[in-house]
Amino acid sequence: MLKRTRHLANHHLIVKERGLLKTSSKILLNNLLKERRFHTANIDCNNESSSEEYHQSLNEFVAFCKRRGFAYQGSSLYGGLSGSFDYGPIGSQLKKNIKDLWWKDFVELRRDCVGIDSPIILHSKVWEKSGHIGNFTDPLVTCLTCHKRFEVENLLGRQEDEKVKQQVDKFETAKEKIDWMNENPQNVTCPCEKKSNSWDKIKMFNMLFQTTYGPVGKEENTVYLRPETAQGIFINFNNVLTTSRKRLPLGIGQIGKAFRNEISPRDFIFRQREFEQMELEYFCNPKDSSDYFYKWVDFCHKWLLKYGLKPDNVRLYHKTKDLAHYSKQTTDIEYNFPFGWSEIWGIANRGDYDLNAHHIVNKKKDKHTFEYIDQQTNERYVPHVIEPSVGVDRILFAFLYDAYHVEDVPGESEKRVVLKLNPELAPYKFAVFPLQKKPVELVHKAEEIYEKLSTKVCADFDVSSSIGVTYRRHDEIGTPYCCTVDHQTLKDNTITVRDRDTMKQIRVNIDDLLQNPTGFLKENPFIQQQQQNNLA
């Protein structure tokens, strides 16, 4: 496993007073919920990518992701575009699997949730009312020597001087850091080669991407690429409530692209200017909002563990300061990346901020635009909203990095790279190939099995390399089982199935496998066999 650094982001020090809670297998979130014992707690002049965007310990991992088709630098043919990545054949399938599982668990399997799909471009008044035009900003500072621009918190987090680092670590809010740099710019060193200490004044930079809607470039035609998918849900609350014929509490989920003109996109796919979100807005009675908030924290945390993240690499951070302008309560689920603990999932109690923001005064009707009337109790209220919001790219990064292992193989000099993904996440569930290309009957039989198997699960057919090389390739892309057609197959209709994690092999009847491949994935006969051997 790649060595994880101990460096933590400035506001992520593990101290009780700062509101951090590290999760382990010995501490169950349910107990915390019952007792309520949460602790309180660079843009270059050009667009070319730079090695500064990657943490040093990520280099090997990023190279692996490119080599195996998970992600490539965006527009690499023309030198690369900062904060932009393309997902390759394996990465795009993994991304699809994550989105499908989220949609199933957060929408399809819940009687209290439905889905929606709103446009990327909304009316500009949506962002005016939501507060994004006025508040969606980051502090930006420019080096007067190299003329590079940096986001202030990121710049301070990259300081090497121990006294400066200790000083910055004391601050709990972004405002405190900005004020300190305004007063002490000479103490802050630019990461450039000249190590300059000369800075322009800090400015607030709006991260909305602006464009023109229609052929005429007038001011009234100015629109924005959405920075989040949530607002498309809020403005459609009445439409969804009416057409779905649901009662509150009601969740409305959406998966879609979002765009933020980040000052410092960095750390591989963790922070990009174009990314994808999976957001749920859960509308409920105001008096129940706090309870639902904790329930959704629990649900999201368990979801990540269910699909394979190690408990020791996940923790909860209950914010008490620096809350977003819309939030009453916020808990971040953080993952231990090589560059430190960082947020992958945010759960916020948004109260009635958004529905009040989009309320349209009607002089003829003395009623709130989004007033809800409970038909059973006749109670009237503007719903409060709990929002579990997660970036697809970030949890994909976490699942990939958590599953990445470099292991010694008994009897071999070279180490094995293996991606121990949960089978439900794995891009390919099975790989089918012949032991060798001759006789042709082996190839034909493998093709026949593949064609039947691929109608039920995502599978791969491979005859490009030797059996050993093929095994290693599928270890690296996370395929749980490799199925080899050999000479015995032609005699008794069985194949060799090799387990990714243990490299053990068993003979399986082809008809049994084809009849229920998903059952094979869930039951894992290799674990069952090991349990039987332990009993014996």
Image: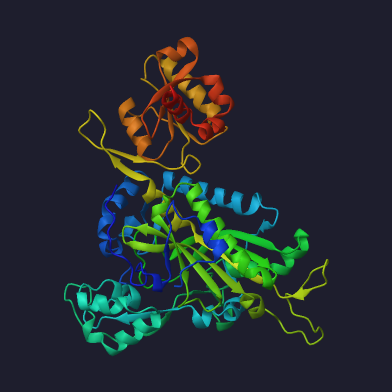
Place of residue 223 in the rendered image (x, y in percent of width and height, measured from the top left): 55, 75
Q: Residue placed farthest to the top in the image? A: 491
Which quarter of the picture shows residue 412? top left
Place of residue 381 in the rendered image (x, y in percent of width and height, measured from the top left): 74, 75
Q: Height in image: 439 above or below 470?
A: above
Name the residue located 61 percent from the left edge and 79 percent from the top edge.
125
Q: Nearer the viewer, residue 168 or 390?
A: 168
> Is residue 30 visible in the rendered structure shown here?
yes
Q: Residue placed farthest to the left in the image? A: 194
Name the residue located 43 percent from the left edge and 47 percent from the top edge.
91
Side (left or right) of 160 relative to 79: left
Q: Give the position of the C terminus as an image quadrant.
A: top left
Place of residue 452 in the rendered image (x, y in percent of width and height, measured from the top left): 55, 26
> Is residue 45 visible in the rendered structure shown here?
no
Q: Height in image: 133 above or below 238?
A: below
Place of residue 175 in the rendered image (x, y in percent of width and height, measured from the top left): 39, 83
